[in-house]
Amino acid sequence: MNRRTTTAGTVLAMLAGLAIGTAGPSSAGADPSPPPANSQALAVSAADRAAAGGLDSLAKGPDEQYERQVVTPWVDDLYSVAYQRTYRGLPVVGGDAVVLADGQGRIRSTQSATGTRIAVTTQPTITAGAAESTSKAQLPVVDRVDSHRLVVRVKDDRSALAWETVLVGRTASAPSRLHVFVDAGTGVVLNSYDDVRAGSGNSQWNGPNPLAIDTSGSGGSFSLRDSTRPGLSCADYGTGQVFTKSTDSWGNGQATSKETSCVDAMWGAQKEWNMLRDWLGRNGHNGNGGSWPIKVGLNELNAYWDGSSVTIGHNQSNQWISSMDVIGHEFGHGIDQFTPGGAGSEAGLGEGTGDIFGALTEAYTNEPSPYDVPDYTVGETVNLVGQGPIRYMYKPSTNGDPDCYSSSIPSTEVHKAAGPLNHWFYLLAEGTSPGGGKPNSPTCNNTTLTGVGIQQAGKIFYGGMLLKTSGMTYKKYRTTTLTSAKTLDPTCALFNKTKAAWDAVSLPAQPNDPTCTSGPTDPDFSMTLNPTSGNAPPGGNVTTTVSTTTTGGTAQTLTLTTSNLPGGVTSEFTPGTIQSGANSSLKFSVSSSATPGTYPVTVTAAGTTTHTAQYTLTVGNGPGGCTAPAWNANTVYTNGSVVSYNGHTYRAKWWTQGEVPGTTGQWGVWVDLGAC
């Protein structure tokens, strides 16, 4: 049975049933009104076609495919669709991508973690055991090896076959769940990243009391487990057991009590869940209607996100630090990990993300003084070293952190490196002189800004998160948040304020930044190819259809071209110029002298805006120069099935994993069973 329980929080034990109202909704409740029927299916179908066709930044090599991973509904009938890249069936870590599509089946944006074309061997010379031994040397204390797998690791536009080993243990100062990548050819450690994110907070008490939290149980048996938010519970760190008792009244008013700390933790997590639902359109902490457990009792002056749960330690007064901004911050790390691209990003972005979600949760809950009032400071009462807050979002330099972005940020300590992101968010939300008792905020370029409000700023930032890819950087966040702002507001008002805030923290324009023109919606379109691949023998031809859709403004005239054609191959569009929203037939003609092989061909449609797609052309793929039959993209072949063609017998052979556009099967090549 689900329960709403009244609790003493950290001040006073009181009877259940006397809860008072708060600013935000107090229960999980129903999700926002659903979008029109089939809108998600239309968006996902469009995203799948874009990924298969290598639209714009999704361009890929002939041995690479995209496999859909997660679909995250956003606001205004928009959907973020995340993809894992594979190379000859191996996962490509650092090669992921994301597509933003709407419920009308229109592509709004694409992002890819890398533009690198992969060409590596898939046969390791270093064993998994040897790689595991090398990996263990990277962590001072290894409790266990969680997993290992063979992958292609892409970082800084370089790719290598690698063993990924996941270790669980401890660094010199914190828990660790470390991913180590060892080159499968040389045995050298390529790089690593840790799922655990550590931060400091305070135990400022929530209120007014009694607080109303969601628990579960009945008939004299209750627990701090929230069944309205699956996965959310609070346990004793020492025993691992979720708190239970015979009554549904929790907490003794002392911040040194683990049970009281769990009250505060559950309260903060439930308010953050509601904020995500009501302000950002997210379904639960994990985006799929679920949450994560909390453990209280870590004997350290800290709190952690470990990749699957939140652990709460104490401050210098031995008070458990489960205040709202700490809980919002640590769950913010989880949200970062459970959005496209994960949490392995440039220094400062993870900590800044946690601070932003802490500030959003405080603002949504809107507790009065002397409780955790809405503000833009972090750990304002923990007083670890007698200097008050540990971070000031409106002016990070107050505590010695950088206000402005510079080339040194990627190598700065992660908490200090959060300064420019926190500063950007405050300027976007509140501006330089917000009034109303809120602090002024200086800019790095001496400009004066007016904010959009914290709820709108949260939408813009979260929209940028839904376009994340692995290896996220400050510069990429500028691009994704500008795209988010433009998508949310076609008048460009939010776009211009988002841009001004980035300029104000000295993060300059980037090559992939979108543009936005005030007035009518900017003209734009998307394009797909069907099929996205085909075979043609020397002397033969193969065709595909180029389809375009107007996604913004009025239709525009598009000129169609191809590039990267192999020698001996020509292309012809019928017609060669179309209006966006129309289709064209593209024929590839292969001369008898064309060299057999597989070639990625770029198809470009250029008008007021320009987009590209990719076609994979295979020429004469039988061995020894034999001309194999065409691989029909609208037919699902059984692996091993045979066909006769030009006096030879061919067998269907998969050469990689992935969908054939227009079918539910896989695609591959024919292999000649006889001598040429």
Image (cartoon, grey):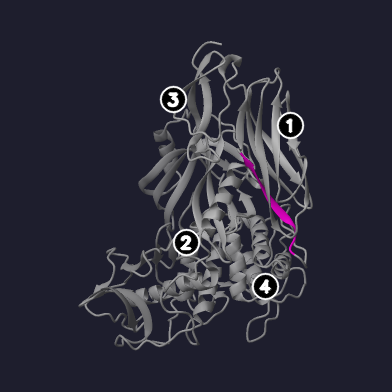
Residue 536: x, y in percent? Answer: 63, 25
Quadrant into which the N terminus falls = bottom left
Image coordinates for residue 294, horizontal then vertical, percent = 37, 66
- Element assignment for label 2: loop
The label nearer to you, 2 versus 3, is 3
| Circle nearer the viewer, 3 or 4 | 3
Q: Quadrant of residue 447?
A: bottom right
Query: Is any atom of residue 62 visible in this view?
Result: yes
Q: Secondary structure at mark 3?
A: loop
Q: Which residues are magenta?
A: 521-530
- Give the residue type that dot 2 points to: Gly
Q: Are marks 1 and 2 in contact (CB under 8 Å)?
A: no
Counting residues from the start of the chain, the first of labels 2 and 4 encountered is: 2
Nearest the eye: 389 or 671: 671
Secondary structure type for disc 4: helix
Residue 576's place in the image compared with 490, above or below, is: above
Count up the numbered dots: 4
**Residue 427, which numbered label?**
4
Is residue 204 toward the left or the right of residue 563 in the image? left
Q: In terms of depth relative to the viewer, which is nearer, 481 or 537?
A: 537
**Residue 311 belongs to magenta span:** no
